[in-house]
Structure formats: C-alpha cells, structure tokens
Image: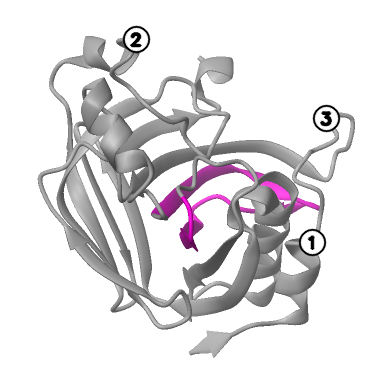
Amino acid sequence: MKTCTVIAALALSVSPVVDDSAARIEGIRADYVEARTASVFAGACHYGSEYTTTGREAVLAWRLTAGSVDGVSLEGVDVVVAVASKQNLAIEDAERWSVVHLSKDLTPERAEAALAWLGAEHAAALGDVRAVERTDVSVRLVEDTYAVRAGEGIELSGTLLPNRECCAMPHKVWYRPFEPALDKPLVGEVTTFRCASEELGRSFTLASVNCVFVGRRGTAASE
C-alpha cells in the first residue's frame, strides 16, 4: 500500500538542523547502511572518472535501536530511503528527490514519529519526497554483514571490507555518509545492490563494488 500523506509533507519540510536544546527528539541510536552508485573506496583516478557520470542514486537505511519523538518510541523501526538526482549526490546543492519506505505494520503514531525524525535531521539529503510507501521493510547489520530490503524494488546485501584501516586512508575513502552522526563509518562491498523505482525514474543493479558505508550512531556516548 502506498501513502503520501500530509504528515510526510509537514515532517519533511522541517529544517534539517536540529535544536539540541529541544526535547522533541531524544536519544536516537541506530544501525546504518548507505549504498551509492559510485565507489566510496577507490583510487583517485577511479573516483574522478565516476564523479561526473555516476553517484546519482543512493539507498539510505536505518534500523533505529533507541530514541523517541514527542515521547513516541522509535525502537525497532526500520527506515529505507531511495534518493536520486541528475548530478552526483555529493554536490551539496544538487536537486534531489526521494521515496521513503516504512513498514506497513507500524502504527500511525510511530510512522508519523519516524517521518518527523527524518524531516528534522535529513530533509536536505532527501530533497523532494515524492512518496511514502508502507511495505515490507528490513534493515539488518550483523557483525560483518548487512542486508536491506524494501518491498519488491530494493535489495541490498554485502560485507564489510576485511581491512578496517582502509576506512581511514586519505585519498582512498571518498564522500561522506548522509548520516553525519555515525560513530565510525566503515566501508563495505555489495554482493547485491538492486533498486527499481517508478517514482524516482531509476532502475539499476550493481555487484562487487566498494560503494557502501556502514556504521552505528549513538553507541560511543553510551559505552
């Protein structure tokens, strides 16, 4: 079932800058997976050749493990967003549009809270939200593996690169994750990266590319 509601429009028009003094959004912790249609770990020449021709699509996925919005718990909520642009998404002012995927099993209150959180923290990254789809959504990060699904159109799976030191190599790791609050972003390789979306006007499949950021937010402060 697809729903594009007034809630979504209102939530995603909120400024992406969060007032730290506000108690509305509290204690967000999450597992995070992000895949782009461009290598995030590569040599400079490879990066340069891709920058102007690819990197125009991305899938952002959170499994919220703690936190609340206006007292509504977001623990256990999975959120998947597909984003597209006519330019590389690393270009800050690039026009972009997106589709948000939430579980069809979420209560209206929890769905509204999830959208409000997205609007408060990620409105700039998402741009024009063209639809909010209520479907089967799953985001899993287990040790060195990750898996993301959203309906019939999005499938993402793979593993982290075995050499953790590579994730901090200057001139090798390109771009910055769209989730700025990650404690320590790591790079992953995709086994499967598939996205087909009529709303975005995009359909692609990638494999065996180092195009993924994986990490957790909120863990460092709690440990």
Task: Say if residue 141 shows up in the picture.
Answer: yes
Circle 3: is it few (<14), some (14-19), or many (20+) Cα within 10 Å? few
The residue shown at (75%, 72%) is 9
Residue at image x 24%, y 9%? 165
Q: Which span is picked out in magenta? A: 58-87
Q: Mark 2 falls on what kind of element?
A: loop
Mark 1 or mark 2, whichever is nearer to me? 2
Amino acid beneath label 3: Asp
Magenta stretch secondary structure, dominant: strand
Numbered disc total: 3
Q: Residue most toward the right?
A: 21
Q: In the image, is residue 81 part of the stretch drawn in magenta?
A: yes
Within 10 Å of the Cα at label 2, are there few (<14), some (14-19), or many (20+) other Cα atoms?
A: few
Sequence-wise, which precedes: disc 1 or disc 3? 1
Answer with mark 3 or mark 2, whichever residue precedes in sequence.
3
Residue bearing the label numbered 1:
13
The image position of residue 212, as x and y in percent, is 30, 39
- Label ID, residue 20: 3
Circle 2: residue type: Pro
